[in-house]
Image: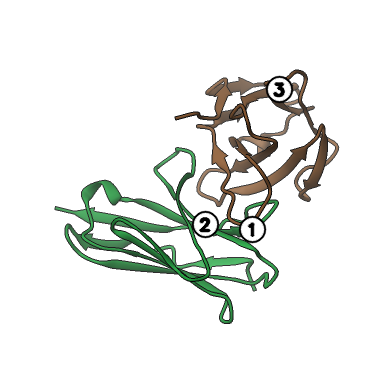
Chain colours: A brown, B green
Amino acid sequence: EPEVTQTPSHQVTQMGQEVILRCVPISNHLYFYWYRQILGQKVEFLVSFYNNEISEKSEIFDDQFSVERPDGSNFTLKIRSTKLEDSAMYFCASSEEQRTNQPQHFGDGTRLSIL
Amino acid sequence: RKEVEQDPGPFNVPEGATVAFNCTYSNSASQSFFWYRQDCRKEPKLLMSVYSSGNEDGRFTAQLNRASQYISLLIRDSKLSDSATYLCAPGFQKLVFGTGTRLLVSP
């Protein structure tokens, strides 16, 4: 069964540094998403991406964050000048279409630890 | 009112039991509804979509009540492997997750 893959599985970074989290969505999917989950809290939407542009973003997704699809397969989340509170699991997801009851499929996440 | 509300549990049930979870949502414009399960420190995994007429997948039955804005999940004949956190997720372009309901199935 096709799956969303994410790298790295764990990223440890010093506060203030930049990180890039990578995702390879399912190949025939057109819609891509990033979510995060701070330890012990709920999964929160960050951003959705379609046709090479952001379609929706949350309040969390401020100027510190950016997304990109640099080639035909990768989808990246860049976090500039990381803060301690950016420590979380970051999940990438993709869906084939955006129609009713079209599910999103999640990758197994990148654990980001900011020191 | 929170966007999505779930009883955090935990629900402790013996193997073979039937257990039901409810979830209420505030956005009446929500068009899609899902149940995901999440194991500790893992990604959400799709359990099932929830259709207006209700739907069943093996031991799992999901119901949607649009008028009251709640979704339910019924698990019959619980297995040890059902132990997980069950996340309700209404949404369309983005999923809005609840905090989840933790289920512990014991021998």
Residue A73 position by quadrant: top right
Q: Chain of mark 2?
A: B
Residue matched to label 1: B91
Q: Assign a secondary structure to mark 2.
A: strand
* Label 1: few (<14), some (14–19) or many (≥20) C-alpha neighbours in 10 Å: many
Task: Please give left or right for residue B3 compared with residue B55 in the image.
Answer: right
Residue matched to label 3: A19
Taking the spot 78% from the left edge, 46% from the top edge, the residue there is A57
Q: Is residue B61 above or below residue A105?
A: below
Q: Position of residue A26 (x, y in %)?
A: 58, 29
Q: Assign a secondary structure to mark 3.
A: strand
In the picture, the disc for residue B34 is 2
Q: CA distance from mark 3 to mark 1?
A: 29 Å
Q: Are discs 2 and 1 less than 8 Å apart at CB? A: yes
Q: Amino acid at mark 1?
A: Gly
B95 and A8: which one is in front?
B95
Q: Position of residue A82 (x, y in %)?
A: 73, 29
Q: Image quadrant for the C terminus of chain A?
A: top right
Q: Amino acid at mark 3?
A: Val
Q: Amino acid at mark 2?
A: Phe
Q: Position of residue A38 (x, y in %)?
A: 58, 43
